Image (cartoon, rainbow, N blue to C red):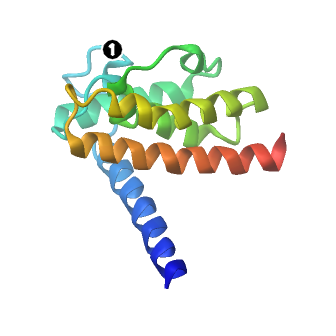
Amino acid sequence: MMAALCSTMGSARFLLAGIVLLAMAGCAGQGPGVSSPTAGLSCVDDSPDCVAKRQATLEHFKKDDQRAWIGQSATPEAYASGVRLFAYSQKKKQLSCDELKRGKIEADAAPRILQGASDKLSLNQISRGKMLAHEVSRELGREIKRRC
């Protein structure tokens, strides 16, 4: 019974991550409200404008061959938006072992950072961010074990 519960919980997390990804992918490209390539890091609501900003920022991160965003500090909103965590997830096969380890450390720290921002973020935003962070941490951990 416990195995079935754990399997159900794991599936629910995966499903939630997929829903967030689909919401981000709903509006591809830069819309009229996208002011900078990193505007999506602070945009956490589900309005079409925010979805477009998050998608544009994710695309910017994915195209950044230098991956400068990995070395930058992140705000709670950046984790709640999901952009950084999705970028780690989608780029994991191209990341060096050092970058993978930095990403795992970041994903492991994200839940604590999100919880500390309860005055700025809704419980739903915090919960979604935490679930995504746990999933990305597991993905990066598997990639580290496989390659590093």
Image coords of residue 128 (percent x, y):
33, 47
Residue at 19 percent of width and 38 percent of height: 122
Please state if 89 lies on the left or on the right of 84 as rendered: right
Q: Depth check: 118 or 85 in front?
A: 118
Residue at 70 percent of width and 36 percent of height: 94
Q: Depth check: 116 or 97 in front?
A: 116
Image coords of residue 7 (percent x, y):
50, 74
Which residue in the protein does label 1 denote? 36
Q: Is residue 127 above or below residue 80?
A: below
Please state if 27 lies on the left or on the right of 133 as rendered: left
Hey, which residue is sitting farthest bottom in the picture? 1
Residue at 55 percent of width and 27 percent of height: 63
Residue at 51 percent of width and 26 percent of height: 61
Image coords of residue 48 (percent x, y):
17, 38
Quarter of the rendering containing residue 130: top left
Q: Is residue 80 above or below residue 68?
A: below
Quarter of the rendering containing residue 88: top right
Hey, which residue is sitting farthest left in the picture? 47
Q: Depth check: 8 or 18 in front?
A: 8
Number of marks in picture: 1
Please state if 114 lies on the left or on the right of 51 as rendered: right
Q: Is residue 55 visible?
A: no
Q: Depth check: 3 or 32 in front?
A: 3
